Structure formats: C-alpha cells, structure tokens
Amino acid sequence: MDRRTFFVKSIGASALAGSYLAFGKPHELLASVAPAAGPAPFDLVAVRGGEPDVMFQKGIEALGGIGAFVKKGQKVVIKPNVGWDVLPERGGNTNPKLITEIIKQCLSVGAKEVYVFDHTCDSWQRCYKNSGIEAAVKDAGGKMAPGHTENYYHEVSVPKGKVLKTAKEHELVLEADVFINVPILKHHGSARITASLKNLMGNVWDRGFWHGSDLHQCIADFGTYRKPTLNVVDAYYVMKRNGPRGVSVEDVVTMKAQLLSTDMVAIDTAAVKLYGADPKDIRHIQIAAEQGVGRSDLENLNIKRITV
Amino acid sequence: MQSLKKIRVVVASVVFVLAAVVFLDFTGHVPTTLTTFLGSLQLVPSVAKLFTGLTVASFGLLFVVLLTIAFGRVYCSTICPLGTLQDIVIRISGRMRRRRWYQHKAAPVAIHYALLGASLITVIAGSMALVDLLEPFSNFGRILTNLGDPILVSGNNAVAYLFGRLGIFGLYHMPLLHMQTIAVLLTVLFLGLLIYLSYKHGRLFCNLLCPAGALLSIVSRISFFKIAIVEERCTDCGFCEMVCKANCIDAESKKIDFNACVGCYNCIEACPTVALKFEGFPKRREISRPTPVDAPRRAFFGVVIAGASTMLLPRQIEGNASAPKILSYDDSRRMPVTPPGSRNQNRFSNLCTACHLCVSVCPSQVLSPSLFEYGFAGIMQPRMNYTAAYCNYDCVLCTQVCPSGALLPLDVAAKKEVQLGRANFIKDDCIVITKKKDCGACSEHCPTKAVKMVPYEGKLMLPELNNDICVGCGACEHACPTTPRKAIYVVANSVHQKAKKPQVQKLENPLESQKDFPF
C-alpha cells in the first residue's frame, strides 16, 4: 500500500466510523423503518376476570403473541403510570404484576434490553419504590430508568399538533425500537379519565405548558407524535373518583379487566365504556379521533372478548 | 498512652466520614438511626433539644458532658466534624509549608467567653442567629449541604450522563433544587474564614469563636484527668509545644492550659521521653497553678454560669399560640411556611440551629435555606420552597432527623393531620377562567382533595377549596402553571393547625358485579 492509498483508505474508514457515531447503532436505523409484523388479527382485545399477568398472557396470545411486537435484539421501553407515592391497591399506578409479565415476555423472545421509566409527580424514588414497580422490574430482569430531571428529555417537534408544536420527550423513548404504553385506567380531575393517551404525558418534561394551554388539545396533539407499538390498559384496580392520585382505597373498585390494542383511540374509547362513562364526554379522545390518531367507532372494529 | 493520637485519628475519621455521608447521601440509603445517633452527640443541637424534654439526644449530651468531665475536650478532636475538617486543613497546610511549628499563645479567653455570653443573651432575647452562625455542627452541615452537595451532585451528574449514554442507569442525574445563592455565599465566607484560621493559627476557631468549645472549656475546668508534663522526664526539647495546634502548651514553664486543649494528643505522641501524660484528680491543684490570668477568667466564668443558668428558666418556646393572622394578598406570600413538626414559627425559629440536615435529607428537596425570611433572628433556617417542589404526603424524614428539636418527630399518620398552611385560590388568575380551558393541575396533585374540581360553565371544571382538609403541602402551588404568579398558593400558618381527615365514603354501585363487556 503506497502512501496515497493509505490516506484515501484511512479517510474512508474514519468517515465510516464518524457516521456510525453520528447516526447511532445500525440496527436502530433499520428498526425505525418498521417492525415487520403481519396484519393484527384483532383491532382490540378485552380480557376480564383474571390476575393482571394471566389476563396479559391471554390477551397477547390473541394478538399473535409478544413475538408479533418484539423482535430479537430490540430495545424495548415500557411506560407504566408510576406518578404517585401510593401502594398498588390504591389504583394510582399501573399494576406491578402486569409490568413483570410484559418484561418477562419481551425478554423471552430475545429483547436486548427492557427499560421502564415514568416522569413522576410525587417524589420519584418514593413512587418507584412504593408503587412496587421498581421491584417488579428488577425481578423480571428489566431496568428501571430515571425520568426526574430535564436532561433526560430532548425536544422533538409534533408536526400534526395544533397547540402542542414541540415537546421534550424522554431519550429512552427516542431510542426505543419497541415502545409499550401501559397506563392504569382511572378517574382524573382534569382529563376526566386517564388511559393510554393521557399516560403519554408522563413521557414529556414540560407538562405545565399542557395544563396552561388547553390540556385536552395537547394530550390529543401528543398522540399524533408517535404511535406506541402496543398499548395495554390495566383495569384491574380502577379508581372511580378523586383521581389521579386518590385519597383512599375506598376510591377504588376491583374490576379485573385489561385491554390491549395498537390503537390509542380505540383502546381509550373501550376503556371509558368499561369505566362506565360516555367517550363523547372525554374531549381529548374526541379530538384525537378527529386528528386521525385512531378510531373511536368500536362497532366497526374487530374486537376479541376473553373471560378468564 | 503513646497510641492515643492514633485512636483519636481513627475515631475522628470514622465520625467525619459518617457525618459527611449523612449529609451528602441523596440515594436515601442511610438509615435514620445513624443520622439521629450522630446528631444526638452534637453538643449545641442537643442542648437546644433539652427544651423539648428528655430524648435520646439528652443521653448524647450526658455522654459528651461526662466525657469532658473525665478527660477534657475529647469532643473537639473526635465527635466534632468541623474540628476534623480543620485538622484536615492543618494537615494539608503543614505539608505545603515545611517546618510550620506552633508557639504557645495565651488563649483569647475573654473574647471567647464574651461571644458565648452574647450568644446566650441573644438566645434568651429570642434569636438563634449568633449560635447559628458560630455553632460547629451547623456550620459543618451547611458546608456539606450548600457546597459539598452541589460539587458531589455535579460530579455525579457528569458520570451519570456518560453512563446514561451507555444505557446504564444505576447512577442517575440529581437536581439541586435546594440551592440558594446567598446561603452558598455565606457558607463560602465561613469556610474561607475557617480555612484561614486553621491554616494560620491551628485550632484558633475552637478557642475564639466556637460556642461548643467555650462550653466544653468551662466543663473541662473540673476534669478528673488532665494532660500534664512530668518535670523529671522532660528534657526541654519543646516538641510538644511545636505540635500543639491549640497553642495551649508552654514548654518553657512546662504548663498546659488544659481548658484550651482540644484533645488531639499530638503532644503525647511527639514527646521523645514520654513526659506527657494524663494526670489524675489528686495532682490537679499542683498542675494548674493559679496565674494572674485566672482572676478575670473566674469573673467571666461566673457571668457565663449565670447566663447559662438562665437558659434553664422556662422559656416560651411554644411562642404565640394565637390564630394565624389574616394577611393581605401580597404579604401572605412573603411569610415562610415552616417544615412539618415545627409546630409554630416562633418555636421553630427559637430552636433551629440551621444545620440544614433536614434540607439535605428531604427527598423532594422542598426544604430550602432561607435568608432573612424569618428575619435576621432566623438567618438561614430552612423553609418550605413550593417553587422548587412540594412536601410528599407520606414522608416524615425531616421530622425524624432534626438534632435540635426544632422539628419534633412525627409518624406518617400524625403528619397527615398537621396543617402547615392553607391554600388560597385566586379565581381571576386561574387558567379555567382566563382561557376557558380545562387545567386542574392543582387538584391532580392534591393528596387530600382539599382542591377538587367542580363543574363550571358547561363542560369545564373549576378548582374549589375545602381548607378544612388542606395540609399545606404546596402540591397545588407547585403544579399551578399560571405566570407570573400562581393562581393557587399556600398561606403559612404561623401556628400549625390540625387538618381534618378527608372524608372517606364507600363507593356506590361498585362495578365488581359487572362481568361482561360494555362494548
């Protein structure tokens, strides 16, 4: 190799290395194109009568198994609701048993790593601990990640947003191949009801802007930003009043239900009916449907109903 | 006896490291028992805590007093972390300038005791300011909380950032919500003075400014065992004087001013002929011969004892028990909310030594050092800063660690019935009124639903207050998105009130029976 070819080759090699550093890991580039999944057999799966883990097993089976959503070597991020420093039976946070089961299933089909986080409202370390989520994640072999300071969030644009044009999204979600949204269904003083659309508010840093600039519109706007790979609505314990934090266990009913869908509008519409309210009264779901986030016409959807 | 110094160094190092860990830990892994144990041994906070009755801290105080009666100011070189901090500076300065020997100097007893007297008088007059500014444990706490913590957290954040890039989240980024510029500056000033004094003059701080040093120096007058020079063995080499950082050994006259001795035992170790040792009670008179200095000293001693005894008189710690004043809209925002367990502002301000232990353990970092919010009398005492965060409903950590009794221990159930302040809602500033849009951030965060949402103009929901069940945690104020001023905020109760328990009713029509799918 003469000097000239040596230089040319080294420049080529460093350019390659540079682009690797600049664009990240190659598999992520591929993954962002589209996870190859066949047509989902059902638009929505509803399960009742079992424990959270059992209901998930039945539900995901109906959707073609976890393998339809998670491929070997992928990075999975799960976003439960861990907003409050309350115990699981208070129905303030997603059921830890459900989180354990989802992580185990993801790892069983070869997920490279499974992260779980939330931008909590109460003191984050207390929320992670007392919700039971942190222990559940560790048990299952996942990683509990922090989300309590601004530096974990990076600005993204929301091109279809009407009021919310930009938001600071958690870096884990930005880097994820698979994003699983796992809210708990409950009453909510401001949003009326919280399920999958509202749960994504915990993905962002600047929530004060949402509250101060038409909350329902912002929730719907953020729904247009990224469609989760899968949504699982935990309706095992359901808080019927004093939400989203609740005051006591008396606010909670044991419903033993679970919903699974890739469509946030469809799953939230069904969740509201399960809760016992009229989806037409929940403005952010209506706006999200109008903005094309998903479908609210449950009567035209292919729904699988399972009783355990 | 030659190994006394080594024992001292080991004990001091252990206490220093533990105290530093207690203040710097942000992971919540340090057991509260360790924190309370270390706090109970700290002289000034434990003396303050006597006013709240007999506690574990009283045993700590008793131990310190008995230790001093037995062996003098052992405290200053082992239990006091600020003493060890000075020793570290002295150690480093000795290395930077070789052959920096100490020389005997008469301790500035008059100024030292005068400062102690002045501290006592200001305490009786109702201000902890002088004690707070001079007290060693609190200064140590403020150095770690206001300077050490930011440095540690910045380093942690840098490493956490790098690890985070690699997908490792065992280390996490920490915010610094309790940082207050003025408190940092005052701490820098004090640390500068401390470094200057220890670099130039050894342990002069302990014999000039320190109220704990002054108190212990008085107690050490009756110590059973005192360090003395055995004249028959002494070869007049003068090593003992050269290594005495308290400047209390006069090698020429072979006299030791034991009241100024901080118990470092450098002299015992340095003596080549083993001529320095603890002498027992019977030889006491022989050793400390009256000198001309002793007459004014005794007079001062009398004044201080008189002053100290007034501390034992019942003091109105509980303060003014009248109902909270009604304040105007703007005044009310200036009144600081005192932490849980403080009971009322006067009581809190009369007992808090501003050690910032509560600030450093608070998981939500709602506690911040004040400047003059309590007046000059309460300089740097902590307050609830609802701009930074809000008080976690189920957390009682601050009340459990307070070493001075300014915050009395509360269990979770008791804390939930304490009302630190009451929410005030300015409807005209609320998003729901000004923008005709739903918001509800305040009600969301409220742990008791003292702020609940009620129907307003059709389908909107507007906050409504029930202050009977408000605990004054500041969640509503913190969450409120209105600018430049919050539409809902907490007005301090200068005397904490009892919050009623939230009403709990059984739910009607539970859905448990509904087994099918409503879609």
Image (cartoon, rainbow, N blue to C red):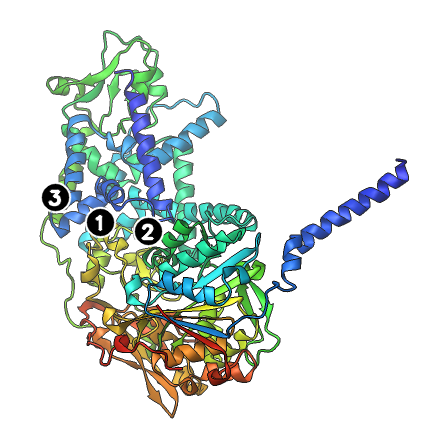
Depicted B170 relative to depicted A196: above or below: above
Q: Are marks 3 and 1 on the same chain?
A: yes
Q: Distance between the residues labelled 3 and 1?
A: 23 Å
| Amino acid tagged 1 | Ser
Residue A82 location (% of width, % of height): 39, 63
Residue carrying label 2: B361
> Quarter holding the C terminus of chain B?
bottom left
The subunit letter for the residue under badge 1 reads B
Q: Which of B11 and A220 is in front in this view?
A: A220
Q: Residue furthest bottom?
A: B458
Note whether residue B35 is visible: yes
| Residue B243 sits in quarter | top left
Q: Are marks 3 and 2 in contact (CB under 8 Å)?
A: no
Q: In this view, does A24 lie to the left or right of A107?
A: right
Q: Distance between the residues labelled 3 and 2?
A: 37 Å
* Residue picked out by circle 1: B404
Determine the image quadrant of residue A248: bottom left
Reply above or below: B309 against A61: above
Give the mark nearest the N terminus, 3 or 2.
3
Q: How many marks on residues?
A: 3
Label 3 in the same subunit as label 2 = yes
Is residue B483 something one can see in this rendering? Answer: no
Badge 2 element: helix
